Image: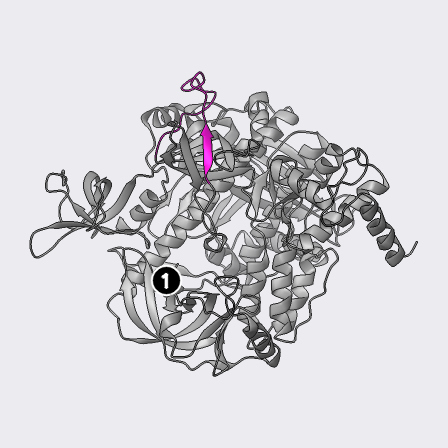
Amino acid sequence: MNEPQDRSNRQQKRAERGERAGEKPVIIQGVVPPRDTLLEFISANPDKGSKREIAKAFGLKGEARVELKDLLRVLEEEGLLTKNRKSLARPGALPPVTVLDITTRDKDGELIGRPAEWPEDQGVAPAVLIRQSSDNRGKGKTPAAGLNDRILAKIFPNKDRTGPAYTARVIKVIDKRRGASLGVVQQLADGEMRLMPVERRGEEMVIEPDGMGDAKVGDLVEAETVRTGRFGLPRARVLSVVGSVASEKAISMIAIYAHGIPHIFPKPVLDESEAARAATMAHREDWRHVPLVTIDPADAKDHDDAVYAELDPSPDNPDGVIVTVAIADVALYIRTGSALDREALRRGNSVYFPDRVVPMLPERISNDLCSLREGEDRPALAVRMVFSKEGRKASHTFHRVMMKSAAKLSYQQAQAAIDGKPDDKTGPLLDPILKPLWHAYAILKLGRERRQPLELDMPERKILLKPDGTVDRVFVPERLDAHKLIEEMMIQANVCAAETLEKKRQPLVYRVHDAPSLAKQETLREFLATLGIPMAKGGQVRANSFNGILAKAQDTAHQVMVNEMVLRSQSQAVYSPDNIGHFGLNLMKYAHFTSPIRRYADLIVHRALVGSLGLGDGGITADEEAQLDDIAAEISTFERRAMAAERDTVNRLIAHHLGGRIGEEFNGRVSGVTKAGLFVSLPTYGADGFIPISTLGNDYFIYDEAHQALTGEKSGLGYQIGDTVEVKLVAAVPLAGSLQFAMLSEGKKLPAGMRSFHKAGRRDRSGGRGKPGTRPPRSGRGR
């Protein structure tokens, strides 16, 4: 049967079910339900939003499942459903696991929370009723939560249709007193003490005369609001002194406190780490003769991975190679349920700032017992991978070993040796160790090129600080083959871990990355059309589809802009016990295994390998397996927390650095376009600033989301993401990390397609707000 006839038959079936306007649908088990019933089911059952679960709920099989898939695709294309990994949901619906801020109580005294993050264009965030059982509080079953806490919660729609739209079960209370504010104490000329906020949207407060505590002018403090009124500023009192804002560590401390990142190890955790002893040979192979080497940044203090490569002597694999990756055996020391384990999960990962690291594990573990130090015996979990000369993996095996690193090298040091400039240390290692590693990398590259992962060109900037903690310079580190070698070998080790655990039917935490949503694909497609770059519509998009787009933009004026937009179209990688593959790497089986010192996800995978392969003590427990859903949700949340804290710290450092240069002009690039104005980045500094739409000129500017542009209605001149512009710095708020610019460059004429788009849109300029023909108010608000 051809496709048009097939579609016609399905439409006829829907009509027969009464799926017409004004008719109440009849539900028959085994028959695809009407649209309204299907949408209602998905709204009421967010944890059953996969196609498999929906088909199961309605008893659909065979042809009915095909018809369901067709209907779901139509609903998604119409914007009535959105896709999150493998699950479908109604737009604006809360995901099954969400971070909530508990903000108030209802008339019955029950706690009410709202999502910690909620898009401004979706209106007011929905209220969530927090369900707590008084019988379970404090007994390790359900964590007790209170007013102003931030929690990780399991979300359920309120089927009673009364009260808040959702109810929630507390998974974890995140340690942060949300009622507290972070700010700097300042004194006015009349002697009044003020708390100046460090967050961009924070509110200035008056500190009560008796509310200073031990704080002094210039101190960074945590304070709570004690009184608010209809007029005047809120009143506050100091809870604790974080430190002097003039100290070199103040900037990262602001981010640590603002994001609630645990940074002080409790005494029981330190006691456990100090009591740990060096590993023995029990349940281990002796690999101390294998010349594994660590290759890391020059300033690295811990080393959790080592590599070695050699030719495969087997006649069955001519010109093949054997690559060995050894990873610190953290599972030996961090046992499930111990104080060290609870603290590691509470942190989720190490957090890296320009001036410090907040580690996941105490120094005794991370920098000593688990660090693969040169010339010292260290326990490791190693994978031995065999590749053909074409870069195809033939086999792999895991081993619990005792190793001794033959050398500690930096990326630059190893690269220099390969490039013909060995030093006293790398000279003797060049032929027996380094050249075989580079030969193996050349073979692995063949496999990578065949796989075609997403290849974005987004250089990462690094901040170099002076001894006093201020910015010395911002630069882009050179991307060396040494970096790529380690990266590819770690990726292959991660693949092996996932494959082995799947083969053993062992539950684990995957690193998953979903394909871009249909809505994001459509936005990107419309944007690329303005540049004359085609993007196929429909079908199963793959990573190499984006590589083709990036190749067309390479060496053109649009290269940076296209890379930026392709990046924005991508989903966010997360941890999950359900495998949907990794879109960006173009891999179906992928789990983080190679950094257990700094990521809790890797520690889970280590335990799973130890347990499923019978490699001794420290394996995963049944209780831990049962909690993998919650653990994956927590560590994904903590990863985003770390990224936000790192980004905020960089913004504050750059704002401090540029704070004395008000009025100066800079070359910038439009890095973001919103209804409120333009974000402009300064490539030299890696900083972002904002230009309110109200300051762009006398014209009325129309926001075009599809093309990421603001265009003057009268002049037709506008600004688009990726444009190179001249700006003047007009304001800097170092404590908030914000910069404000004034635009000096004139707008440009947009492509003809975009101008016609705007003309067509003039019939109703309300954008869905207010009466037709009225203009939405201009906004100068930043992010």
Residue 683, x across and y down, in percent: 42, 69
Residue 632, x across and y down, in percent: 54, 36
Looking at the rendered structure, the secondary structure element under dot 1 is loop
Q: Is residue 780 left or right of residue 618?
A: left
Q: Residue furthest left?
A: 190
Answer above or below: position of 741 versus 143.
Answer: below
Magenta stretch holds residue 132: yes
Choose top left, top right, bottom left or bottom right for residue 656: bottom left
Residue 754 visible, this angle: yes
Q: Is residue 393 left or right of residue 605?
A: right
Residue name at image x 45 percent, y 30 percent = 130
| Mark 1 Cα-neighbour bin, 10 Å: few <14, some 14–19, many ≥20 | few
Mark 1, residue position? 781
Q: Nearer the viewer, residue 428 or 577?
A: 577
- Magenta-tinted stretch: 127-147
Q: Nearer the viewer, residue 11 or 397?
A: 11
Q: Is residue 257 left or right of residue 506?
A: left
**Which three-letter amino acid code belongs to the residue tagged 1?**
Arg
Residue 403 visible, this angle: no
Residue name at image x 20 percent, y 50 percent = 233
Magenta stretch holds residue 534: no
